[in-house]
Image: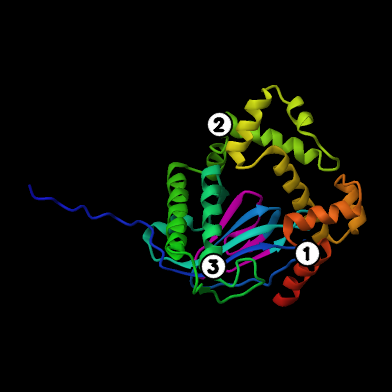
């Protein structure tokens, strides 16, 4: 029997990236704008940005992504009330299928967020300087990168774009697309828990207080939250506190003692220790690093 080979089609092919960044920006951040002959997307991981582009003026909120096609002018400013964390990737792609992303912004679902996480992790493995290094326009492949990391960046990016394209092709409008984001009961429960935690960032919180506020059993709550987010309830709550602390530091409206009080820490010393344990730097060092990013960009 003669074996026949099947040629596999490639709908979206990316062989080169230009920049790949993960930024935490202050509320005062403003850009003059730019355009370039390659694709760019910006995913808002936290906070909100205000965008001006050839396709109009609009806001991109947490959990949303916006695409800029080649040679499209665009600029983005931080929302002062909600300083953003952004994933920004620019890349070359001549595939016809990319036309679906022209003038598009939309919400990212849970599966796609996991792909984004994998993509960012491999970006750290494959590229230098670090993705969070302030405003470096030239990136290089790491000489000592993990085996296959550059190929995984390519594959994860192509896979992510294919997932996006599939969803966009199935929907007639962005409003219908947003309605499909109401995913399973597990995701709904997790979102409710996170909302509850966000409302209690001003105080200390026990695990018992969390599950006493929901009708499901303790074991089911813990299991569901762990499966959906990848971490435990109290670990997630502590992360939320640190993320909120970062925002308050970047807003530059409160001193560290006031921030500690706002987040329910018993003392500035406990807050500083917790912050350093979570981020690897003191609040003061973190504030300096954010300011350095602004100064390096001017």
User: Cα distance, mark 1 to mark 3?
Assistant: 34 Å
Residue 200 locus on image (x, y percent): 81, 38
Q: Does the CB distance between marks 2 and 1 fall below 8 Å?
A: no
User: Cα distance, mark 2 to mark 3?
Assistant: 37 Å
Residue beneath the point at 58% across and 29% down: 185
63 within the magenta span? yes
Disc ID at residue 72: 3
Residue 38 locus on image (x, y percent): 48, 70
- Give the mark, 2 or 3, whose residue is nearer the N terminus: 3
- Give the mark, 2 or 1, whose residue is nearer the N terminus: 2
Q: Tell me if I can see residue 188 in this picture.
A: no
Residue beneath the point at 80% across and 67% down: 285
Nearer to me, 14 or 152: 152
Q: Secondary structure at mark 3?
A: loop
Disc ID at residue 184: 2
Locate residue 28: give its quadrant. bottom right
Which residue position holds label 1? Answer: 286
- Give the mark, 1 or 3, whose residue is nearer the N terminus: 3
- Relative horizontal placement of residue 145, taking residue 88 as reference (left or right): left
Q: Is residue 57 above or below residue 262?
A: below
Assess disc 3: are there few (<14), some (14-19) or many (≥20) residues with their C-alpha within 10 Å of its C-alpha. some
Q: Which residues are magenta?
A: 51-76
């Amino acid at each position: 029997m003669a074996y026949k080979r099947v040629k596999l089609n490639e709908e979206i092919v990316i062989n080169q990236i230009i920049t790949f960044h993960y930024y935490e920006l202050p509320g005062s951040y403003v850009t003059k704008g730019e355009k370039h002959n390659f694709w760019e997307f910006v995913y808002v991981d936290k906070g909100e940005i205000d965008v001006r582009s050839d396709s109009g003026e609009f806001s991109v909120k947490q959990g949303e992504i916006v695409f800029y096609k080649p040679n499209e002018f665009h600029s983005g400013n931080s929302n002062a009330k909600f300083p953003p964390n952004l994933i920004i990737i620019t890349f070359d792609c001549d595939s016809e299928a990319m036309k679906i992303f022209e003038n598009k912004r939309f919400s990212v679902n849970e599966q796609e967020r996991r792909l984004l996480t994998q993509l960012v992790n491999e970006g750290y493995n494959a590229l230098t300087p670090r993705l969070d290094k302030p405003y470096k326009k030239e990136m290089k492949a790491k000489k000592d990168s993990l085996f296959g990391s550059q190929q995984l960046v390519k594959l994860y990016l192509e896979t992510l774009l294919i997932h996006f394209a599939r969803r966009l092709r199935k929907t007639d409008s962005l409003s219908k697309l947003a309605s499909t984001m109401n995913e399973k009961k597990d995701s709904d429960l997790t979102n409710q828990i996170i909302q509850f935690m966000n409302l209690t960032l001003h105080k200390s919180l026990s695990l018992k207080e969390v599950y006493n506020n929901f009708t499901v059993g303790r074991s089911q709550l813990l299991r569901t939250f762990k499966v959906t987010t990848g971490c435990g309830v109290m670990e997630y709550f502590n992360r939320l506190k640190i993320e909120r602390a970062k925002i308050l530091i970047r807003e530059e409206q409160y001193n560290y003692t006031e921030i500690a009080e706002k987040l329910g820490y018993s003392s500035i010393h406990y807050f500083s220790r917790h912050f350093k344990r979570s981020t690897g730097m003191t609040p003061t060092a973190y504030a300096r690093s954010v300011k350095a990013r602004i100064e390096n960009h001017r």
